[in-house]
């Protein structure tokens, strides 16, 4: 069975820098859900994110960060993602993976 990854990013007053980092993240993870917890939606920014194939959900800070997590995780689970990455601040996203990332010791 293929393990499908998905990423959840919680945003608050997102900027163009956040959008650029979401686009970089898209190179690593196909299914991304961004939950915008801002009190006011930037319609143009949301449109740009959607046009890049990233789900963006306005949450208006309902339930705080936990509410944003719940909303985003529900969407990723609905997309059948089995591995979930949760990011609250996406300031810088590398598009390369360390060669020894798979060699971390396993607990126990």
Image (tube, helix red, strand yellow):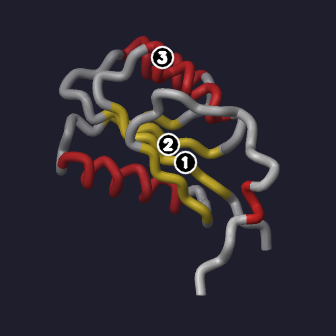
Instruction: For the residues labelled 2 and 1, say whether their Cβ atoms are less than 8 Å apart.
Output: yes
Looking at the image, is mark 2 or mark 1 nearer the viewer? Answer: 1
Q: Which residue is mark 3?
A: 17
Secondary structure, mark 1, is strand
- Which of the two labelled residues, at mark 1 and mark 3, occupies the earlier sequence position? 1
Category of crowding for the residue at label 1, using alpha-carbon neighbours closer than 10 angstroms: few (below 14), some (14–19), many (at least 20): many
Residue at point 27% right, 39% down?
59
Mark 2 or mark 3, which is nearer the start of the sequence? 3
Q: Residue at x 59, y 87 (%)?
A: 108
Q: CA distance from mark 1 to mark 3?
A: 18 Å
Q: x and y percent of residue 52 in the render?
A: 62, 25
Give the spatial CA distance, label 3 vs label 2: 17 Å
| Vertical relation: 31 (above or below) 2 | above
Residue 76: where, in percent of width, then height? 52, 55
Query: In the rendered view, does 13 fall on the left or right side of 17?
Result: left
Which label sits on residue 7? 1
- Badge 3: residue crowd in 10 Å (few <14, some 14–19, many ≥20): few
Q: Quadrant of the N terminus?
A: bottom right
Q: CA distance from mark 2 to mark 1?
A: 6 Å
Residue nearest the observer in this picture, 74 or 3: 3
- The residue that mark 2 highlights is 33
- Which residue appears at 56% of the width and 34% of the height? 54
Residue 25: quarter of image:
top right
- Image coordinates of residue 105 in percent, x first then y, are 68, 72
């Amino acid at each position: 069975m293929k393990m499908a990854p998905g990423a959840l990013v919680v945003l608050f007053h997102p900027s163009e820098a956040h959008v650029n980092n979401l686009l970089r993240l898209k190179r690593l993870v196909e299914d991304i859900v961004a939950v915008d917890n801002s009190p006011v939606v930037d319609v143009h920014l949301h449109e740009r994110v959607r046009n890049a194939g990233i789900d963006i959900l306005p949450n208006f800070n309902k339930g705080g960060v936990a509410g944003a997590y719940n909303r985003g995780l529900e969407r990723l689970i609905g997309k059948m993602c089995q591995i979930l990455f949760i990011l609250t601040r996406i300031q810088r996203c590398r598009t390369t993976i360390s060669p020894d990332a798979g060699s971390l010791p396993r607990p126990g």
